[in-house]
Image (cartoon, rainbow, N blue to C red):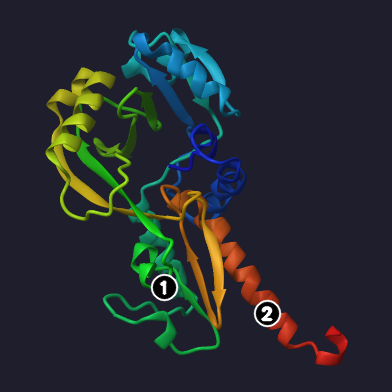
Amino acid sequence: MLAPWCERATTDAAVATMGAASIEWWSQHFPGLVRNGSLVVVQSRDSADLARFAERTDHFEWIDAERIAALEPDLAGRYRRALFFPDEAHLDPRRALATLVERLAERGVAIRFGVDLLPDAAPGDAVVDCRGFAARDALSDLRGVRGEMVMVRCRDIALARPIRMLHPRIPLYIVPRGDGLFMIGATMIESERRGPVSVRSAVELLNAAYALHPAFGEAEVVELGADLRPAFADNLPQVRREGRVLRANGLFRHGFLLAPALARQVADTLRMETYDADIPERRRA
């Protein structure tokens, strides 16, 4: 999800600032981007949560049941009020990565998969270390935050945009991927345990999806996934310089949202260093 303003409700303002520009970047580099906005809903008993969410962010519209039905016909009659973020977007990350690999190959960039190579041992004048949580060996203050998701196929419901349902225990988002596929996420657990999705998390995610719409009760479970999000103490990304190695990390749960901004910071740093190296020492002084 490229949802800087939805994320602003629970994160630092820097996430929205850096993330807002990424929507345009992805639209220029990935034709599969969908710019239908995001919708945030709640069950009637949790209406106060929607108001609190709205207080912490912007770039949204309060909409009523009629407008909800116009945007998402399959949710008609189920929710009385919602927040609509019209400027947000979403993409399929696997398709997006495949497209980027193809574009880089067209430009003569060689990519090798399945190769173990520590950044300090890599050749070149500059090395960018963006290994995520694997960079813990060099970034002692990096922590892992466990996230789990479920992929389901349900042809009895159609959604045009990501739907977030606020919940006191486990907030839910459902992202349509086309062909009846939906990604349901995601837990956020302060744990560095890797391994399969737990029964508790799977049950909570699927129960929340069923609460959003009963049609998900007949969905097929296609995939369960879990991994660790790399994060620093403030949950904001950083670029650190150690000799010829630039370490870009700490994207937390905002990988695709903040990656363009972080990559631009890395590129600007490398470009400036190259420019400085071409200036005679006497002129720098």
Q: Amino acid at mark 1?
A: Ala
Residue positioned 46% across, 67% down in the render: 103
In the rendered image, residue 162, in percent from the top left (x then y), is placed at 39, 33
In the rendered image, residue 181, in percent from the top left (x then y), is placed at 25, 38
Which image quadrant: the N terminus? Answer: top left
Q: Please tell me which of labels 2 and 1 falls first in the chain.
A: 1
Residue positioned 56% across, 41% down in the render: 12
In the rendered image, residue 37, in percent from the top left (x then y), is placed at 49, 32
In the figure, 203 relative to 67: above or below? below
Real-space CA distance between mark 2 and mark 1, rounded to the nearest whole angstrom: 22 Å
Q: Secondary structure at mark 1?
A: loop
Residue positioned 55% across, 83% down in the render: 244
In this figure, which residue is indicated by the disc labeled 1? Answer: 138
Q: Quadrant of residue 78?
A: top left
Image mark for residue 273: 2
Residue positioned 38% across, 24% down in the render: 166
In the figure, 7 relative to 134: above or below? above
Q: Nearer the viewer, residue 46 or 6?
A: 46
Label 2 Cα neighbours within 10 Å, binned few <14 / some 14-19 / many ≥20? few
Mark 2 or 1: the one toward you:
1
In the figure, 45 relative to 172: above or below? above
Q: Secondary structure at mark 2?
A: helix
Confirm or deny contact between disc 2 and disc 1 (CB under 8 A): no
